[in-house]
Image (spheres, grey):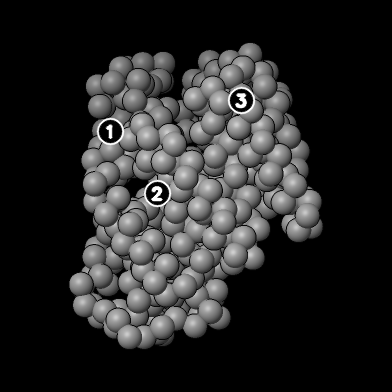
């Protein structure tokens, strides 16, 4: 593809792009960030920094078609090597890991090569982590560990301790899943020591706790670690960790019929449609059908207005699942349509059994 092979990225420029690329926003929602960056992009339509952030935000919001169209458009243009590498890296995140694995592997390898060529070890480190996941999913565990060791090394050279922590935590998780207990603990300890050594702040214990939860075999242990996440002050940097933890703990409490605990666990940092959905789930579990239907529909409507696709999908599925309890003639046509038109690959995978049961797969 066309690019400027002679131009070199300055270390400061690379650092700015990297921070914009990898960090979550302290805004109230990803939608707020999208609105802000859309305005910035309108003011600076040729700025690759804003274009990349727009692609990232559309990806986070599940607007995959828009994200794919934007990244493909940019890859056809002449690009500075730095941005060419970043667009290849973005492409690996947008496409379907099951259907497009070869395409993803090709693009992540392009990105790694470019970042090595322009000597941006922080970006090389970041990109080696998804390359390790591809090797792991292909069954080559030793190769995946080599990529992660290389990622940790490049992060150390770049003085990016959080990236080094991520590389060690990723390897710890992989080791736990293939029964390499000693390696799991050693990599976990490396991550903890780095957090202490670099005085990274208590919030960076959140991915450690999340990793411990994912690595645990017993559901009670998982719930305990996720509860520790929820007991910590909310950090926008780890927004996804908090929501994942809350979903896991909430499901366990609903199964045990501890409804008051579920309602008491609603937090101020949670988005409106998500809290509405929680109240609807409690009402359905209590067989308060009329109230549950109203709450679920409110969650569905609010989520669509605020473009919280995951919440809208969950609310739609909840209403379809309980259609018979709501009424014989309860109209779920719009909910069927929404699920058929908007599901992300990850959402479909998580809800696969229920979708098949309801004839939605």
Residue at 33% across / 72% down in the picture?
84
Quadrant where the N terminus lies? bottom left
**340 w.r.t. 217: above or below:** below
First along the sequence among labels 1 and 2: 2
According to the picture, the residue beneath numbered tag 2 turns out to be: 131
| Residue neighbourhood size for the residue with mark 3, other residues' Cα within 10 Å, grouped as few (<14), some (14–19), many (≥20) | few
| Residue neighbourhood size for the residue with mark 1, other residues' Cα within 10 Å, grouped as few (<14), some (14–19), many (≥20) | some
Q: Position of residue 326 (x, y in %)?
A: 41, 20
Give the label on residue 336, or none. 1
Residue at 50% across / 58% down in the picture?
125
Q: Position of residue 336 (x, y in %)?
A: 28, 33
First along the sequence among labels 2 and 3: 2
Quadrant where the C terminus lies? top left
Task: Measure how far apart labels 3 and 1 are at the Cα level.
Answer: 45 Å
Query: For residue 215, which quarter of the picture?
Result: top right
Q: Nearer the viewer, residue 95 or 312?
A: 95
Give the label on residue 56, or none. none
- Residue 66 falls left or right of residue 133: left
Mark yes or no: residue 78 visible. Answer: yes
| Residue neighbourhood size for the residue with mark 2, other residues' Cα within 10 Å, grouped as few (<14), some (14–19), many (≥20) | many
Task: Measure how far apart labels 1 and 2 are at the Cα level.
Answer: 36 Å
According to the picture, the residue beneath numbered tag 3 turns out to be: 181
Element type where label 2 sits in the image: helix
Residue at 53% across / 65% down in the picture?
122
Q: Nearer the viewer, residue 67 or 147?
A: 147
């Amino acid at each position: 593809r066309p690019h400027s092979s002679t131009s070199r990225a300055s270390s400061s420029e690379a650092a700015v792009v990297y921070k914009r690329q990898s960090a979550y926003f302290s805004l109230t929602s990803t939608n707020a960030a999208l609105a802000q960056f859309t305005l910035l992009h309108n003011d600076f339509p040729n700025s690759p920094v804003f274009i990349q952030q727009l692609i990232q935000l559309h990806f986070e919001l599940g607007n995959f078609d828009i994200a794919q169209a934007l990244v493909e458009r940019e890859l056809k243009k002449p690009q500075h090597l730095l941005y060419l590498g970043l667009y290849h890296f973005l492409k690996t995140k947008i496409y379907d890991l099951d259907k497009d694995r070869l395409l993803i592997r090709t693009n992540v390898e392009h990105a790694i090569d470019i970042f090595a060529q322009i000597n941006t070890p922080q970006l090389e480190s970041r990109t080696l982590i998804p390359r390790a996941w591809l090797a792991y999913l292909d069954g080559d565990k030793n190769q995946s560990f080599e990529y992660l060791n290389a990622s940790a090394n490049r992060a150390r050279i770049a003085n990016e301790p959080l990236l080094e922590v991520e590389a060690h935590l990723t390897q710890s998780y992989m080791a736990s899943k293939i029964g390499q207990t000693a390696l799991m603990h050693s990599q976990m300890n490396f991550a903890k020591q780095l957090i202490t050594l670099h005085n990274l702040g208590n919030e960076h214990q959140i991915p450690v706790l999340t990793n411990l939860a994912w690595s645990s075999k017993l559901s009670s242990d998982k719930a305990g670690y996720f509860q520790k996440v929820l007991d910590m002050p909310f950090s926008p940097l780890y927004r996804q960790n908090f929501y994942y933890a809350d979903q896991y703990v909430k499901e366990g409490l609903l199964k045990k019929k501890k409804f008051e605990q579920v309602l008491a666990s609603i937090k101020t940092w949670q988005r409106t449609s998500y809290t509405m959905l929680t109240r609807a789930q409690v009402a359905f579990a209590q067989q308060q059908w009329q109230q549950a239907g109203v709450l679920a529909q409110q969650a569905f409507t609010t989520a669509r207005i605020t473009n919280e696709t995951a919440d809208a999908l969950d609310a739609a599925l909840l209403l379809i699942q309980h259609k018979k309890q709501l009424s014989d003639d309860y109209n779920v046509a719009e909910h069927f349509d929404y699920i058929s038109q908007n599901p992300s690959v990850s959402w479909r995978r998580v809800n696969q059994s229920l979708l098949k049961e309801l004839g939605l797969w």
